[in-house]
């Protein structure tokens, strides 16, 4: 497999200090809306979440952004999953959005904390019943003998809660990621990409351009 010539140039846009919002949350909102509106950008809410286990091993997976607060980003998961165990021992996390149709990437570093149960329940009950049952049926990240066993458990719960409210599992809910560092990346011609970081300095943000 010859991959050395698999490449393309980036020429859609430029990023300069004058065009950046001084607030990285506002800058993110602008880019996020553009990604949502772009006809070729699929799954704009998808991001890579990186955590570190108690043994120092990094772990990554794709999760979906479900809310943006004034102070951070919210996603939902099983607290007893690999990511939940990682966050319980080390709250430092990193996010990575890759909006390749726009030749843009955003990296965010910070820490995660659980949202309140009321907020988690409000989202849980906004989901389709099938997704609610899935959250109840799956012991996420834990081994299982077969898919048939998982589906059998799902259908048993489906019968148990037919015409009834599905209880939100105690081990399920949201995390708020509070950002302390952003990087906005815009692809550039000749691999001279534009990169700007925002680093939290108490109540302010220090903005720097990085070399590509």
Image (cartoon, rainbow, N blue to C red):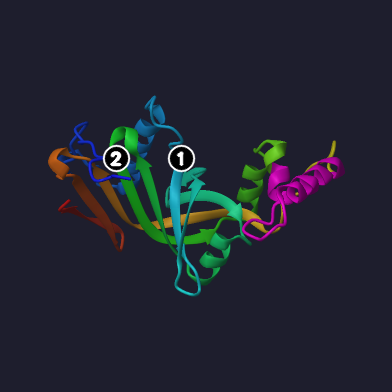
Counting labels gives: 2
Q: Closer to the N terminus: mark 2 or mark 1?
A: 1
Q: In the rendered image, which quarter is residue 172 located in?
A: bottom right
Question: Is 199 on the left or on the right of 151, as rendered?
Answer: left
Question: What percent of the width, then of the height, locates residue 155?
Answer: 80, 42
Crowding at dot 1, Cα within 10 Å, few <14 / some 14-19 / many 20+, comes out as some
SS category of the residue bearing label 2: strand
Question: What percent of the width, then of the height, locates residue 47?
Answer: 44, 46
- Residue 115, compared with residue 42, is above or below; it is below
SS category of the residue bearing label 1: loop
Q: Residue at 51% of width from left, 48% of height from top? A: 63
Residue bounds of the magenta highlight: 132-160
Q: In the rendered image, which quarter is residue 82 located in?
A: bottom right
Q: Residue at 28% of width from left, 37% of height from top? A: 103
Q: Quadrant of the N terminus?
A: top left
- Residue 154 seen in this snapshot: yes
Q: Which residue is mark 1?
A: 45
Q: Residue at 70% of width from left, 52% of height from top? A: 138
State yes or no: residue 140 in magenta.
yes
- Residue 69 seen in this snapshot: no
State yes or no: residue 159 in magenta.
yes
Q: Which residue is mark 2?
A: 104
Q: Residue at 15% of width from left, 40% of height from top? A: 18
Q: CA distance from mark 2 to mark 1?
A: 14 Å
């Amino acid at each position: 497999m010859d991959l050395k010539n698999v490449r393309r140039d980036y020429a859609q846009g430029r990023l300069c200090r004058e065009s950046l919002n001084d607030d990285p949350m506002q800058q993110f909102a602008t880019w996020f809306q553009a990604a949502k509106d772009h006809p070729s950008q699929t799954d704009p809410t998808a991001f890579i979440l990186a955590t570190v286990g108690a043994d120092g091993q990094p772990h990554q997976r794709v999760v979906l952004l479900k809310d943006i607060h004034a102070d951070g980003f919210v996603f939902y998961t099983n607290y007893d999953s690999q990511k939940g165990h990682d966050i319980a021992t080390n709250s430092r996390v990193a996010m990575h959005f890759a909006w390749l149709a726009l030749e843009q990437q955003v990296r965010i570093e910070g820490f995660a904390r659980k949202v309140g149960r009321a907020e988690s329940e409000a989202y849980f009950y906004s989901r389709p019943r099938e997704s609610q049952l899935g959250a109840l049926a799956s012991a996420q990240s834990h081994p299982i003998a077969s898919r048939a066993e998982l589906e059998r458990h799902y259908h048993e719960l489906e019968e148990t809660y037919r015409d009834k409210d599905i209880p939100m599992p105690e081990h399920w809910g949201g995390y708020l990621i509070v950002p302390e560092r952003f990087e906005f990346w815009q692809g550039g011609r000749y691999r001279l990409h534009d990169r700007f970081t925002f680093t939290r300095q108490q109540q302010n943000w220090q903005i720097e351009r990085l070399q590509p």
